[in-house]
Image (cartoon, rainbow, N blue to C red):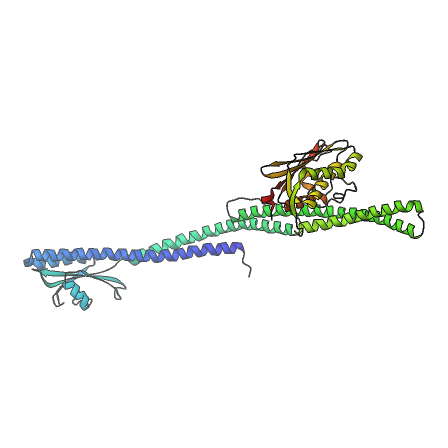
Amino acid sequence: MKIKYFHQQLASHFSVIIIAFLILSLLFSHFVEQFVYDNKTEELATYGQSILTDIERDQRNSRSILKSYGYVLESRDIQYSLFDEKSVIIYSTGLKAPLIELNEEEWRELQNGKTITVKQEFRRFEQAVTFVLLPYFHRNQFVGGVLLTSPIKGSREVISQMNSYLIYTTFIALVIALLLSGLLSTFHGRRINRLRSATANVAQGDYSVRIPTADVDEIGELAGDFNRMVEKLETSAEEIESLENRRRQFMADVSHELRTPLTTIRGIIEGLRNDMISESEKARGLQLASSETMRLIRLVNENLDYEKIRSNQVTLVKQEIQLGELLEIIEDQLEDAAMERGNQIVVEVGEDVSVFADYDRLTQVLINIAKNSIQFTENGMIWLRGYTHDDRTVIEIEDTGIGMDPGEIEKIWSRFYKAIDSRTTNPYGEFGLGLSIVKQLVALHGGTIDVESVKGEGTKFRIELPGEVLGEE
């Protein structure tokens, strides 16, 4: 069953007010009744003590003293009686017999000098009646006492009047509660409806929606959490869309890359089968088919490498490697490619610098980065540096190429991203997977890789790898 927020607020406020009214009524009724009873008891005890004191002082005129007290107390609606040690009435201003019967324990306490007070509902007066019995001792001998009785007037009237005030107050409070409930429920209802509407928009794919926030209550905090959630969803959606766009571009590139070598290989095979290629051109055709086949293998291997690295299926075989020798081998492998673009490779590394890493994977990383430097540098310099710093081996590959904007630096690590839409024949970079693989491999070694680049001035990749003790798995 659906209950509106307004009705919930109204019911809660009304319930609190009504329950408070009932509790206050009971407490006030009890307090007023007890207060009146205590005052009446104290008053009767005071009169009774005065009667006994005056009688003890002047026993010869006891009758006149009792009559004078009777006139005074009658005006206050108080009756009293004297009784002897056997509980027999010997003098009374109105009642001729005891109004109450004391049990043995109460009679014993009275004989021991204790004042006895009793409150009873007296039906004839339809109100509570207070009895006070005070003992009378003559020469330290119990000889009787005095009984004073008076109806407790005014308690019910006071309680009734207080309840009337409470009813008026409760009615006013209920009206105020109705207004406050209406205002609060309307205010909070609008905020909740905004959240519902925004949630519906997000469910339909609109991540631009935002809700006004105010950190004054939980709904405001919820709105803030909602906005942060939508911002993350929007960022994730943009990343997914960007990844999807790059994936589609990658599929187009792969299709093109596959189509070209496959067409070439098919043409060579058809030419050889139909004797359409002369003997002098057969060797060249076979060499071309072999090159295109290796190109297809590189494409497949690069994708397999990325998936294996991403799913931690690559096992590194680490060993101590002389960094100078490794960089010189890379220089020899890339020298021809660098010369084709007018670049010069310079190796700068100390003689005793070594690195603890997987030889094949580290070579793959350095060749990938160096070939990127060659690809984006023309008639420039490429430095391969190596040194130690704080028990870590640092490898730097710097070029004087075209450089990158700050926004491009973060994108280069993304899968399928290519800085330009050219299709080169790099073994580890032509399909936009190279640097993504590089970052994964460096992370597997427990190292870090950073990039510094200035548009039009060049780029520097900096790799830090831990020493042997830190790098062991």
Residue at 78% in and 49% down: 297
Query: x%, y% of residue 117?
Result: 21, 61
Residue at 42% in and 57% down: 18
Report if residue 414 is visible in the image. Answer: no
The answer to whether residue 329 is left or right of residue 83 is right
- The answer to which quarter of the image holds residue 76 is bottom left
The answer to whether residue 43 is left or right of residue 5 is left
Task: Establish if 249 lies above or below 167.
Answer: above
- The answer to which quarter of the image holds residue 59 is bottom left
Residue at the outermost front position: 352
Looking at the picture, tell me which residue is in the foreground, 192 or 242.
Answer: 242
Query: x%, y% of residue 158?
Result: 31, 55
Report if residue 175 is visible in the image. Answer: yes
Looking at the picture, tell me which residue is in the foreground, 433 or 246.
Answer: 433
Residue at the outermost left position: 60
Query: x%, y% of residue 173?
Result: 43, 52
